[in-house]
Amino acid sequence: MGQVIVVTSGKGGVGKTTTTANLGTALAQLGNKVVLLDADIGLRNLDVVMGLENRIVYDLVDVVEGNARLKQALIKDKRMENLYLLAAAQTREKKDVSPEQMKDLTDQLSREFDFVILDCPAGIEDGFKNAIAGAEKAIIVSNPEVSSVRDADRVIGLWDAQAESKSAAMLIVNRVRPKMVARGDMLEIDDMLEMLAVDLLGIVPEDDHIIVSTNRGEPAVYHKESKAGRAYQNIARRLMGEQVPIMDLNSDDGIWAKFKRIVGLSRS
Amino acid sequence: MRQDIVIRGTTRTGLLLLLPDEWEFPVLCQRLREKLAQSGRFFAGAGVTAYSGRRTLSMSEQATLSEILREAHMTLLAVQEGGDPVAEAQAAARSAEEARRANSAPVAAPVSMETALVVTKTLRSGQEVRHPGDVIILGDVNPGAVVIASGHIVVMGALRGVAHAGATGNTEAIVAAARLRPTQLRIAHVIGRAPDEDTPQSVPEVARVRNDLIVVEASSEKRQA
């Protein structure tokens, strides 16, 4: 049985879809069989970020309603053999799917895949309830900024409340600008962790590559020079149970360069 | 069920005999004979003070009572009007206490485990605890979370959300926290908000109402009389 992980945040625009796309790709690069599931029915994005929009024939709602078999609806990634996408329906609504149907779907997928990653819509309504229904792990994405942390706290509370058997939520702090944190203009990661009281899964720096890669439909993990891409690769390895130290973002460019070289060496 | 005759030991005055008001005197005598017969010689030798309730016993009735008791080898020491002296003393103390409470300002009772709700987790944004009594939270209260209690609120971790103590009007209620950083504090009808400038404090603090203002001080400071 594979892991079913939901990527959620409460607040919109913090990087759930980017995180889903990059983690999924990184996990696939590490040899796992991965399926990404876009639970944002009516506002789908994951297909665009993955560059697979033009290959969608059937979507999640088609599968749930029996118009298509699951196998037909799974879209194979254009770069990775072992990476698949189940797209959201764009012309339907969140309440066209029930939490029970989502759970059945993720149960089926987890029998075939090592990782099932759900891209949760923003908010805490029907779409959120659908997305967390079948997940046994939750990745909470938050930016180092007060309103995002507030929403993350709300979502962690809802996650904790819904089932005891599920594992504790994990936090990814996304779009961190080390220099702003150092100046005290952004929330300290330690302060975020103290308030949210969850395990830190990773820190992802703000990175211009993300914008470029999103527009091109090519996740940042493909770009060797992308710091965010490297952070996501580290997170993927942590999800597989490896012990990978958290990147030190407070170092200056000189040390960054050194760090890059070390990572470059270790990968070759 | 009718109240029965009560025979009870006391510490100083020997036995105490309570004669219920509902019974006619002849019936009372009959019942007393039965009761003493059931007891056998258990009360033999004892001195008895009879409490006649609201009735007044005539001399002949007192003589009859004395005779019945002597047949059971007991001595009638005295006859008094009124009911159970112990119960009456308790009732008097209770009503005095009630009067004192009604007249004087309410006293801050210690945190009582009987009425206290103990929350053993952190309250996150959107979560709310309401309780008629004291609330103790073994965890944090995060921004966006709300605690409302008619009594005191004690947070063993950081209080960053909204706390309303004494919500039913008790201005003596307090809010205490290991780290008191509330979004807003309310005690009874008084509302206070956090200062806009954050003043880092890491000592446990207590908030209470003084002169209709919420005052925060370190919990280790001696309370002024």
Image (cartoon, rainbow, N blue to C red):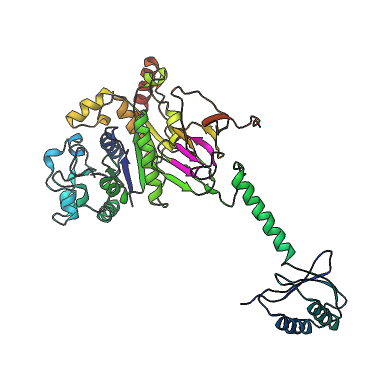
Above or below B95: residue A171: above
Magenta stretch contains residue B153? yes
Instruction: Name the image quarter holding the N terminus of chain B.
Output: bottom right
Nearest the camera: B186 or B126?
B186
List x then y, in percent, for residue A164: 42, 52
Nearest the camera: B52 or A185?
B52
Above or below B104: residue B179: above
Quarter of the image for residue B28 reads bottom right
Residue that extends furthest to the right in the rendered view of this protein: B45
Above or below B6: residue A67: above
Nearest the camera: B166 or A254?
B166
Residue B111 visible in this rendered orientation of the protein: no
List x then y, in percent, for residue A85: 21, 43
Instruction: Name the image quarter holding the C terminus of chain B.
Output: top right
Nearest the camera: A237 or A143?
A143
Q: Which residues are magenta?
A: B146-171
Magenta stretch contains residue B8? no
Residue B9 visible in this rendered orientation of the protein: yes
Kindly identify the residue that appears in the image at 41 percent across and 44 percent down: B127
List x then y, in percent, for residue A230: 32, 29
User: In the drawing, does residue A60 fall left or right of residue B129?
Assistant: left
Kindly identify the residue that appears in the image at 70 percent across and 70 percent down: B54
Kindly identify the residue that appears in the image at 26 percent across and 41 percent down: A121
User: In the drawing, does residue B222 fall left or right of residue B48?
Assistant: left
List x then y, in percent, for residue B144: 40, 37
Q: How many marks?
A: 0
